[in-house]
Amino acid sequence: MSTKKLIVFTLAIGLTLGLSGCGRDGQSSSTNAPDKAAGVAQSSLQITRWGPDRTKAGVVFNEQSDGSAALWIRMNKSLNGADVVVDFNGQPLTTAVQGDLVTATVPPSLFAAQGTYALHVSVKQDSAVVQSNGVSFVVE
């Protein structure tokens, strides 16, 4: 197993264990934000919960053992075996999948400035990319 795959696998296990209770603790949201990218198929792929849904500018959220920030996203179906990417305001994130739970590390540059940022999950299916509904991540 390559070092990169081992790191991603380790991150996925750590996030899964660390986030297993997430979803009903006030750190998640289910409000949909409008987000339609041109050329990407819209589908029944839905983000049902995610967290955290906000942070303060420059403040690491959901801090992992290596000091990185991480998001968790619950989908309406299992994505095991799929080619999945979490998109944070147009930037693809390092992503891990376990069933309907998608986790992603967020580089500090993406939450350094205040604003409302679009999140969505994309799944490559054959030659098409299927995109989930869009939700928001707020940096205060």
Image: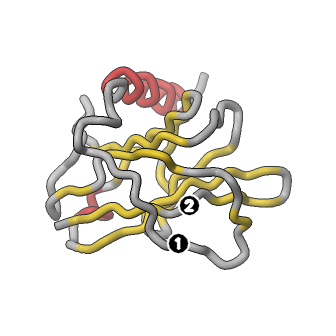
Q: Position of residue 54 (x, y in %)?
A: 24, 57
- As drawn, 90 above or below 25: below
What's under tag 2, amino acid-wise? Answer: Asn
**Tag of residue 135:** none
- The crowding category of the residue bearing disc 2, from other C-alpha atoms within 10 Å (few below 14, some 14 to 19, many at least 20), is many
Residue located at (33% from left, 43% from top): 70
Labels 1 & 2 near each other (Cβ < 8 A):
yes
Q: Distance between the residues labelled 1 and 2?
A: 7 Å
Residue located at (28% from left, 47% from top): 52
Under circle 2, the secondary element is loop
Quadrant of the frame with the N terminus: top right
Identity of the residue furthest to the bottom in this view: 38
Q: Position of residue 123 (x, y in %)?
A: 67, 51
User: Mark 1 sits on what residue?
Assistant: 35
What's under tag 1, amino acid-wise? Answer: Asp
- The crowding category of the residue bearing disc 1, from other C-alpha atoms within 10 Å (few below 14, some 14 to 19, many at least 20), is some
User: Mark 2 sits on what residue?
Assistant: 133
Under circle 1, the secondary element is loop
Mark 1 or mark 2: which comes first in sequence?
1
Q: Is 65 displayed left or right of 85 in the figure?
A: left
Q: Is 12 displayed left or right of 22 in the figure?
A: right
Residue located at (58% from left, 28% from top): 99
